[in-house]
Image: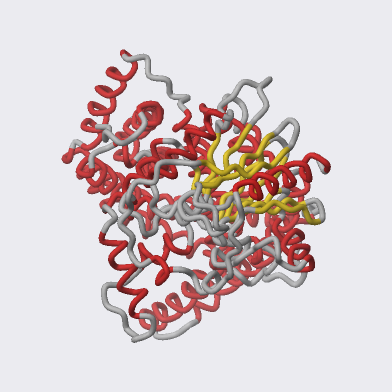
Amino acid sequence: MMTSAHDHGTCLYGARYISGLLKAFSAEIEGVRAADDIESVHRMRVASRRIRAALPLFKDCFSGKEYRFWNKEVRTITRALGAARDADVQIEFLLSIIGNVGERDSATRNGAELPQEITVAAEPATRDLLLGLKCLLLRLQQRRASLQPDVIAGIDRLESTGVVGVMEDTLAGYLEREEFRNTDVRSPAAYVHAFSHITQQIDEVFRFEPFIAMPDRTGEHHAMRIAVKRLRYTMEVFRDLYDCGIKEPLTPVKHLQDVLGELHDCDVWLGCLPEFLDSEKERQQEYFGHLEFFRIVEPGIRYLIDDRNRRRQELHALLVRTWTEQNEERLWESLRETISTPLLGRKQDTPAAVALIGDVRGNHPALAAVLNDARARGATLILNAGDSIGYGSSQNEVVRMLKTENIISVIGNLDRDVVGVKRVQKTSKNRKRHRTLLRVRRGLSRKSRRYLRTLPETVRLTLFGKRLLLTHGGPSSITDNISERALDQRLKHLAAEAEADIIVTGHSRRPFATEVDGVWFVNTGSAGKPGDGDSRAGYALLRQDPFAIEHIPVAYDEAPQEMHGEEDCEPDAIKGHKITEPTAQQIDRTTEAQQSNVEQHK
């Protein structure tokens, strides 16, 4: 089951989680087939969705053949159940509306006072409303009945492929082997794995933050609903890694999903009801030759459209209020801190040390020397600011080390350009650079390219109470070039916009650390190709107690590196900079001054 390159603890954790889901999934098969209880469809659909959410998280634990087969079959049954469940939800909702209207009619006949929430000025007669609503209910029930054969066919296919049994047997065998070996699921790699996936989903949710206050951005609200759902499922997958740490934030995340879900339900009704009116009008004109019955049906549908419009306005206001309150209550900062803290991999009474590296540029000997030095100085977490590949001949070894050493990385502009370069260039501009990028790309294995494509442009962590932003160039672009020569006004603007206490970058390959308006800007320097005139590998060390930032040059045996025209690949923003050649003593003095400056502000 497990590929040799993946962590045993991570895969054992995934096997346990997916095994539990399979039991819940298979327990509903007969209930779905019988169609006696709509909740059977709901429970099986939820279980299938959770399996679909979990499988990609542990994709590297399975062979490619296993993963493709399992994912395809689970996706197929999820789709078959999805349409049926959506129809069930609409029918259940419509029955509740009809019940409310019927209660109002009864209260009116008995002279009772109507509840305020179902009192609408100048409404049509209740009987007219019920006729339209019941007509719609009939059409929905007919559609649901037409979907049941597809559901049965999906169940038949599921059983004929035997995918559930195959998954159960494969996972059971793996669980037995790993538990016999006493494999620990709480491995450092497991926490890095969980952090990477949860923070990726948080960032996806925040991508839609600008649209929350805009009531007409229904597409973005729907996409945000999906993002929040995926975040919730991902948090649930890794919940047991953090004991009770994730249980508390799961509740508000679920509430946010529920609000967005009901908002989307309103949008679905508001989209399908006008279509229903048009189709019903056409149907009755064709069948009866007139529209007298349609005029009886129409008021109930118009009433439902008005009802869903009112409810959507209420829900949008609730969404804005919920998002604001969750930010004020520091939900997201607290969640980031929960998933960041275990990355330090230390005892509570041990001061934390974090190594900040960047611009390795495919130089494996330099990376190995930097990591050895950082570990010797007590670093338990390594953050990499990107441009991991470049012009050296050991690029695949660099990528392999980044993975096996559990280093959290972002993508650099050079990484992005290399994995994204096309074989044929459409323009004649910069052909030499294009050829160089192609040569670098050919030196990368498929696994290395896939790894680099998965890297985000930014990573946010909360470590020892400080919000840290890791990016290659700057908060808004990986090609930004932040240097200590940057104007104070620009740094002040970046400090105000970044929502971070420490901003870690690379790109310029010139180490520096400076504080502006309470925000620290740190350039890691370059591990593989320094731009400050010092041939030694460079990195920065961030210490917790006392708070300090130290830039450290590391001497190493420079193995011959086959270079690929590096100057042709240099970003335009860096080319042409005059480099002042400092001595080792000057670098040491600069490091001491930076560390002293940090300690004065701690």
In front: 185, or 163? 185
* 150 lies above or below 248: below
Total marks in image: 0
- Residue 327 seen in render: yes
- Which of the image's four quarters has the N terminus? top left
In front: 141, or 389? 389
Name which residue lies at 65% across and 33% down. Answer: 248
What percent of the width, then of the height, locates residue 85?
Answer: 42, 50
- Which of the image's four quarters has the C terminus? top right
What percent of the width, then of the height, locates residue 459?
Answer: 57, 50
In front: 552, or 544? 552
* 13 lies above or below 279: above
Colour convention: secondary structure
Name which residue lies at 76% across and 43% down. Answer: 598
What percent of the width, then of the height, locates residue 286?
Answer: 36, 82
- Residue 37 seen in render: no
Name which residue lies at 37% across and 14% down. Answer: 182
Tell whether 319 sits left or right of 389. Answer: right
In front: 202, or 292? 202
Name which residue lies at 61% across and 61% down. Answer: 474
What percent of the width, then of the height, locates residue 207?
Answer: 58, 60
